[in-house]
Image (tube, helix red, strand yellow):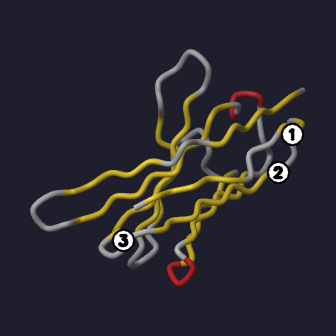
Amino acid sequence: VQLVESGGDLVQAGNSLRLSCAATGSTRNINVLGWYRRAPGKQRELVATITTGGGKTNYADSVKGRFTISRDNAKNMMYLQMNSLKLEDTAIYYCNARQNLGIATMNYWGQGTQVTVSS
């Protein structure tokens, strides 16, 4: 599975941005998709996840009410709509896919896309 993020940009605080993640390769049995981020000097943290089956979502407290994760299974795409961006949202955002192979669970990562929020 290969994951490619896009949509990162430099935006002013309060504005919106939408990130996209395209999955290619053997995408069968991917059961959870997610966005993670790594801010300068900090560890990578969970932003949001969504199940490919029922579309159940989970958000970090810091983004609840501002960010929305979604997916299009037919297109093998995942999105992150980010509204009311804050300076502290500045980070590299990574796409993640979790694939259940029965005997093992595989984790795949994209290369990341930079989001910079300015005042």
Q: Earlier in the sequence, mark 2 or mark 3?
A: 2
Disc nearest the viewer among 1 and 3: 3
Query: Distance between the Cα atoms at labels 1 and 3?
Result: 34 Å
Helix, strand or loop under label 2: loop
Q: Nearer the viewer, residue 111 or 119?
A: 111
Q: Position of residue 65 (x, y in %)?
A: 66, 53
Three-letter amino acid code at the position of disc 2? Ser
Q: Nearer the viewer, residue 94 or 1?
A: 1
> Dot 1 corresponds to which residue?
11
Q: Position of residue 62 (x, y in %)?
A: 59, 38
Total numbered circles: 3
Q: Which residue is found at the position 50% from the left and 65% from the top?
A: 23
Query: Distance between the Cα atoms at labels 2 and 1?
Result: 8 Å
Q: Position of residue 78 (x, y in %)?
A: 57, 65
Helix, strand or loop under label 1: strand
Compared with residue 73, is residue 16 higher up or lower down, i.e. above or below?
above
> Dot 3 corresponds to which residue?
26
Three-letter amino acid code at the position of disc 3? Ser
> Dot 2 corresponds to which residue?
16
Q: Earlier in the sequence, mark 1 or mark 3?
A: 1
Task: Kindly check if marks 2 and 1 are in contact, taking CB atoms under 8 A apart as contact.
Answer: yes
Compared with residue 21, is residue 14 higher up or lower down, i.e. above or below?
above
Query: Distance between the Cα atoms at labels 2 and 3?
Result: 32 Å
User: Few, some or many C-alpha atoms within 10 Å of disc 3 (few <14, some 14-19, many ≥20)?
Assistant: few
Using the rendered view, name the quadrant where residue 53 is placed. Answer: bottom left
